[in-house]
Image (cartoon, rainbow, N blue to C red):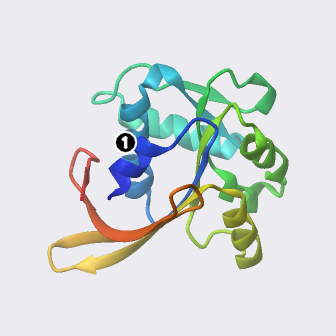
Amino acid sequence: MGIKKIIGSVNGGENVLILYPDNDVFLSLSKLIADHYGRKNIGWFVFNEIAKKRLEKFFKIFSRIAPKDAGRVFMSYDDIDRKIVISYGYHFQLFTGMNADDPLIRLILDDEVTLYNFIYRNAIDERKSIALRDLFDYVIDVEEKEAPLGKEFFYSVKAYVYPHTEFSGAIRIDGEYNLVE
């Protein structure tokens, strides 16, 4: 089993926490999720203005190779009209001082939404990280390792679903932000 199979096996209403060490990982995994579900079917939830601007910058940088419609971006939980949501920027609350817990908890508890929540690895305190892990059905933890021929990322997946799923592996990311398992 690999990350691609995990993305394909997530059921409606289940939630995935992705702890990532590098924007390459965020870009490739969000691309994988968008490709799997279709960009018209996903929504992007951002926790603050910093996250919104950063995500818009990513969309602009990749506009010549990415589809024009990357999906709708939401800043309010009440505006979400998609069943598949990729949330981004929770860790930017370090800069804003605004607590992003309420919208995240609402997204997690919404049985109608399948949530993929990205948090930059080690950007939030350990106690909060442990508590967050307990709220998600899947936890994908990615670490960067220097390899002889460039970067390699090692990941572990722990899923609190039936049947129990726990495994680890390695990935590389190619020049087009595709995952190579």
Q: Residue at x 64, y 38 (%)?
A: 13
Instruction: Tell me if I can see residue 154 in this picture.
Output: no
> How far across and how far down the image is residue 160, in percent?
60, 60
| Nearer the observer, 86 or 67 | 86
For this orientation, the residue located farthest to the left is 149
Instruction: Tell me if I can see residue 145 in this picture.
Output: yes
| Nearer the observer, 178 or 175 | 178
Quadrant of the snapshot with the N terminus: bottom left
Q: Residue at x 49, y 38 (%)?
A: 57
Q: Residue at x 75, y 47 (%)?
A: 104
Taking the image as shown, residue 140 lies to the left or right of residue 4, namely: right
> How far across and how far down the image is residue 35, in percent?
36, 33
Instruction: Please give the residue where the numbered disc 1 appears in the rendered image.
Output: 32
Look at the picture and state if 104 lies above or below 52. below
| Amino acid type of the residue tagged 1 in the rendering | Leu
Dot 1: what SS?
helix
Quadrant of the snapshot with the C terminus: bottom left
> How far across and how far down the image is residue 68, in percent?
39, 19
Look at the picture and state if 69 lies above or below 22. above
